[in-house]
Image (spheres, helix red, strand yellow):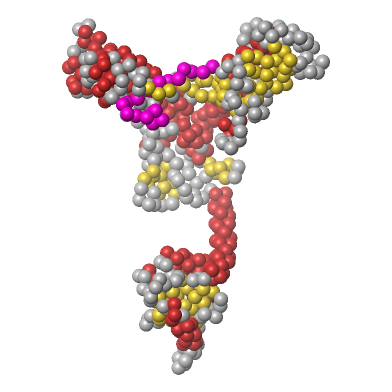
Amino acid sequence: MKPAGNRVVRCAIYTRVSTDSGLDQEFNSLDAQYDASQAYIRSQAHAGWSLVKARYDDGGFSGGTTDRPGLQRLLADVVAHRIHIIVVYKVDRLTRSLADFAKLVELFDANGVSFVSVTQQFNTTTSMGRLTLNVLLSFAQFEREVTSERIRDKIAASKRKGLWVGGMVPLGYILKDGQLHIHEKEANIVRLIFQRYLELGSVNRLVKDLKERGFKSKVRQLASGGTRGGVPFTQGPLFYMLRNRFYLGEVKFKGEILPGPQPALLGRELFDAVQQRLTEQWSHRTTTRIRTRALLAGLLFDDAGHRMILTYSSRDRVRHRYYVSAPCIRGQADEPVGSVTRVPASEIEVTISKAVIANTDIDEPSSNETLSRETLERFVTRIEVHTNQLAIHLRSDENDHQGIKRRHDPDPDEPHAVTSRTVLVPWKKPSKPARKILLPANTPEHRARPMKADRRSALIRAIGRGRLWLQEIIDGRETIESLAARQHCSNRHINMTISLAFLAPTLVTAAVEGRFPRGIGIAALRDPPAEWSQQMRRLGLEPTGAAGSANR
């Protein structure tokens, strides 16, 4: 600690001896330590050091403990910010325990206090002193690690003896007097979860079923006073619960199944049936993955030489397959990628299969549009995706491609021109038309962001409800009041929703296509003016939507 300007640095001297022998002398060991420390403080007077009046002496106290009256008074003054620097004759006068030393240093740092050893080159106000401190703390860290190992060994021994060693109590149990007991209300929920899984056969369906029943996870009180849990069940916790042998009265420790301290909550027959069902489902998923292996895996590359890997995305409950350049998947932003980084899997697989069939003597597939993986590996060594063409490299080994057609003089008018053993296929990646986002007036194009998908879905549903309710009123089947009673809402909500049925066709189309900018949603579109052009102007948009649009 370095004083700023003329600031006074208050220094306290701490002295200690292990025995009370000689303390009755006129000048004892405590006095000797005090005088040496006092002289050191005087030598630092130019730095603003000043000795406090209070003395902190411990005569006849061991350095292996911090339960010393003088030390406790010193620490109390440290916390009260009455001291800036602690001066000792030797470091071991403060403590002989590395663990206690680390705790004291932590307390000193928290309160902005340094300490100095007079007879040792140890001063935390200097870089060398801090280095020495770090060396000593490394030994303290070693002592803590050894202690942790002993604790882990004790926990392992306790688990092998079937003793409860603490932790989060699973749903279905309660801890009383250090012992686990069955919580009947929660236990019934656990049994129901296992039984419903067997009936439904799917964890996804089980999640929905438990949510409809209003079941939630166990609420746990934290030491901080907060709570955890009390939320609807999700897939991860349910999978863990269904596999948890704790409910059989067992515990799993480092691969061993050991008898636990808790009573069994489930019958083994029910638990084993659930395990078999889970294993069957996992095996089915693994088999499906193997069967749907990427047709072009290991063969398809971009024009920068990177392998293209099969990936999936789901939209509107439909799974779409794509081949994506490897650096894009791995997040290697600095890696140069090809001109085409992502292609639709189905389209490119069909295109390549047709090109291989056209340039070989193999028969066309009878039921599928694509060749088998085995056939492709027999004839094709590599496929490169370029901006406007695919380069399909056929095998040059005579024994491996006896069905390849010989074309030394390719006809440029043919759809597939062959150069040596390479088939060049004209190709262009299918692209979606640019989406024109309706821009409010005075909004620059680079600031345009389309509405979020969830807002778009909610808007489309609201427009649909408005049109449906309007038709029911026109047909005489419902009134505003009856609709409000049926939907459990106010008459105003019904009126505002029906008003969406009078939106201009351009606005409805923009909603379906997601071309509204962020900030325009259901509330902004309710109760529109009767004139369509006025509807656009009220939103701050051009009547045609063309002048204020941006391609995105």
Report x, y in % for residue 503: 27, 16
Q: Is residue 16 above or below residue 97?
A: below
In front of the other: 367 or 456: 456
Residue at the far bottom: name it. 26
Q: 168 left or right of 488? A: right
Q: Residue at x 18, y 13 (%)?
A: 479
Q: Where is residue 360 shown, x and y percent of the image? A: 73, 10
Quadrant of the snapshot with the C terminus: top left
Q: Nearer the viewer, residue 513 or 253?
A: 513
Residue 346's quadrant in the figure? top right
500 horizontally vs 74: left or right: left
Decide if residue 30 is in sight here: no
The residue at the point 60 percent across, 42 percent down is 255
At x 24%, y 18%, the residue is 534
Residue range corresponding to the magenta coloring: 430-448
**With respect to residue 123, does 511 lie above or below?**
above
* Image quarter (top left, top right, bottom left or bottom right) of the N terminus: bottom left
Indicate whether residue 447 is drawn in magenta: yes
Q: What x and y, as percent, mark residue 272?
A: 54, 30
Of all residues, the one furthest to the right in this rendering is: 398
Considering depth in this image, is 478 or 287 the residue closer to the camera?
478
Vertical position of residue 69 compared to residue 508: above or below: below
Residue 173 is at least partly visible in this image: yes
Q: Is residue 123 magenta?
A: no
Between 108 and 543, the residue placed more toward the observer is: 543
Dominant secondary structure of the residues highlighted in magenta in the image: loop
